[in-house]
Amino acid sequence: MPVVYSALAVVAAYLLGSLSFAVLVSRAMGLSDPRTFGSKNPGATNVLRSGSKAAAIVTLLLDAAKGWLPVVLVRWWGAPYGLEEGTQALVGLAAFAGHLWPVFFGFKGGKGVATALGVLVGVSGWLGLATLGAWLVVVFLSRYVSLASMAAALFAPAFYLLASGPLWYADHRVAAAMGAMAALLVWRHQENIGRLVRGTESKLGQGKAKAGAEPRAQTPPAYPKKKHRHGK
């Protein structure tokens, strides 16, 4: 039965991760579909380009929460059902994969930065805090958000293993899941890596006019878009 419970938990985590909150929040707040402007990435950063900071913050929090929730549910209540560290690793990775390839949105998702952070906080609040600190240091030094996101993702599994002790016990399966998330997150930043190499990546606080190869938002029509389908 533990195998069945674990499988159900993984599927539930993937389905939760598949909720693209960038799209859902934008739709609920009457904003443009984030997949139609800017980087076309359904994430909080692109939602911010719509001009709504509130929508971006809500998206960020919800994207993080969908990574955090499956992990803490298994941590807090999984033991009686035989769900322990191995299932924590799987549900965290499943929620992250759901964000990257959401079944409800044509398997076209975001880059997973907020969801990955949520998973780390679910494993350990201290780990999440340390990873956020690493992100802030790289942003402060470089002003490249994409570089900071990749650096923090690579930092997390290494720190998790090296700092194992009184705050958490490092499990190799959880570390492997973090490593897989880091690799996928870096892979999803391929375009950013190209711009970093060419020196055209936009820095934090940089004006839109200097955003390199990043396309300008064309301010597409807000939801609903059905009018375009039915118009004659």
Image (spheres, grey):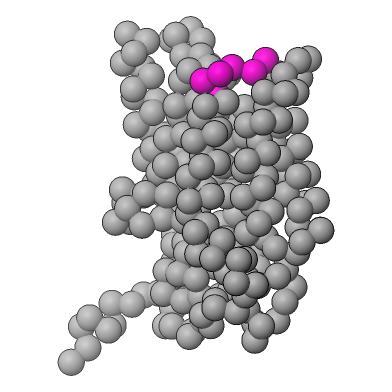
Closer to the camera in the image, 120 or 229: 120
Image quarter for residue 140? Answer: bottom right
Q: Is residue 141 above or below residue 7?
A: below
User: In the image, what residue occupies the spot 65% across and 68% down?
Assistant: 53
In this view, which residue lies farthest toward the left?
Answer: 232
Closer to the camera in the image, 197 or 167: 197
Closer to the camera in the image, 165 or 118: 165
In this view, which residue lies farthest toward the bottom?
Answer: 232
Q: Position of residue 198 (x, y in %)?
A: 60, 72
Q: What range of the chain is rendered magenta?
A: 169-174
Question: How many numbered marks, from 0 up?
Answer: 0
Q: Position of residue 189 (x, y in %)?
A: 52, 57
Residue 170 seen in render: yes
Image quarter for residue 124? Answer: top right
Residue 26 seen in render: no
Image quarter where the N terminus lies is top left
Report if residue 122 lies within the magenta region: no
User: In the image, what residue occupies the spot 51% across and 10% down?
Assistant: 79
Q: Position of residue 56 (x, y in %)?
A: 60, 63
User: In the image, what residue occupies the spot 42% across and 83% down?
Assistant: 221
Image quarter where the C terminus lies is bottom left
User: In the image, what residue occupies the spot 65% across and 86% down?
Assistant: 209
Q: Is residue 137 left or right of residue 94?
A: right
Q: Position of residue 228 (x, y in %)?
A: 27, 84
Q: Is residue 122 above or below residue 53?
A: above
